[in-house]
């Protein structure tokens, strides 16, 4: 199965993310803008594009039965990233915003990770940073802007733009990965392995993210499964959320 109606998917994602953002940062209700989860720039609908978190070229290598039973969108996981050109030190970065940045710096390494034989091949830091960055996007896909606009979210957004090496602030336990044997064929009773690319569990100050047969950690500032006040201007620290709107790129 190929991707299904991407224009409609984009509109659905846009409205869902807009409602989530407005619930955390109410003044966005007076604009028609959305924050890119990577660079945190406030931009318009036309400047966003659908992003396959697990790249299309990676899931294209899935077994034929899996490709037939589960759509490409499901096997990839979708979010929105900006395609507005990035400006660094007054100069335009080639490509189409964060969408192109991920495609250039992370997607080839993610494709390798899903096909690699870990018994005979050694991964490098580029593979691990790519995994960490899509783990952050997976958290954003599941929990929204409460992840992106937290201190840990800012660290992940900064790491997104440092593809060659881990930043010193990234915890050491987030710089390793654990692997198991990948599924070699599609089975109906194991369909979730293909249909939901990420499994996420919260453990203290990190989220344990599993991409198919690869496990790794991503830092979090608070447990995103726990409720917090979205309406009251003043509430106990445990139930409050103060968004960090720091941009990473111009």
Image (cartoon, rainbow, N blue to C red):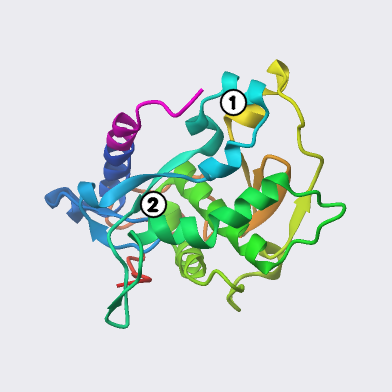
Label 1 SS: helix
Q: Could you tell which of marks 2 and 1 lies nearer the N-terminus?
A: 1
> In the image, 177: left or right of 133?
right
Q: Is residue 9 in the magenta section?
A: yes
Q: Nearer the viewer, residue 183 or 67?
A: 67
Q: Is residue 225 in the magenta section?
A: no
Label 2 SS: helix
- Residue 105: image location, x then y, percent: 52, 63
Residue projecting furthest to the bottom: 89
Q: Quadrant of residue 124?
A: bottom right
**Tally of numbered tags:** 2
* Residue hosting label 2: 145
- Residue 9: image location, x then y, percent: 34, 32
Residue projecting furthest to the top: 188
Is residue 212 visible in this depiction of the protein? yes
In this rendering, the answer to whether 186 lies above or below 82 is above
The residues bearing labels 2 and 1 have C-alpha atoms spaced at a distance of: 31 Å
> In the image, 170: left or right of 144?
right
* Residue hosting label 1: 67
Q: Quadrant of residue 235?
A: bottom left
Q: Residues within 10 Å of mark 1 (few under 14, many from 20)?
A: some
The quarter of the image holding the C terminus is bottom left
Is residue 224 visible in this depiction of the protein? no
Q: Nearer the viewer, mark 2 or mark 1?
A: 1
Residue under the point 77% across and 52% down? 178
Residue under the point 27% across and 56% down? 233
Q: Residues within 10 Å of mark 2 (few under 14, many from 20)?
A: many
Query: Residues in magenta?
Result: 1-12
């Amino acid at each position: 199965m190929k991707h299904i109606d991407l224009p409609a998917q984009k509109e659905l994602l846009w409205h869902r993310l807009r409602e989530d953002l407005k619930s955390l940062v109410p003044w966005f209700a007076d604009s028609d803008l959305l924050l890119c989860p990577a660079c945190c720039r406030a931009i318009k609908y036309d400047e966003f594009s659908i992003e396959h978190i697990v790249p299309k070229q990676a899931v294209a290598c899935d077994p034929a039965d899996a490709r037939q039973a589960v759509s490409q969108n499901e096997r990839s996981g979708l979010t929105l990233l900006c395609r507005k050109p990035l400006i660094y030190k007054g100069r335009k970065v080639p490509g189409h915003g964060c969408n192109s940045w991920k495609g250039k710096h992370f997607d080839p390494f993610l494709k390798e990770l899903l096909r690699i034989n870990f018994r005979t091949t050694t991964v490098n830091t580029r593979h691990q940073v790519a995994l960490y960055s899509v783990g952050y996007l997976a958290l954003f896909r599941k929990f929204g802007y409460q992840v992106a606009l937290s201190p840990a979210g800012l660290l992940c957004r900064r790491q997104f733009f440092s593809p060659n090496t881990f930043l010193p602030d990234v915890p050491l336990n987030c710089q390793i990965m654990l692997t198991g044997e990948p599924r070699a064929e599609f089975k109906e009773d194991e369909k979730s392995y293909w249909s939901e690319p990420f499994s996420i569990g919260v453990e203290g100050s990190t989220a344990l993210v599993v991409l198919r047969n690869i496990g790794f950690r991503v830092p979090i500032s608070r447990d995103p499964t726990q409720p917090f006040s979205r309406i009251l201007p003043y509430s106990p620290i445990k139930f409050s959320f103060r968004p960090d709107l720091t941009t990473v790129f111009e």
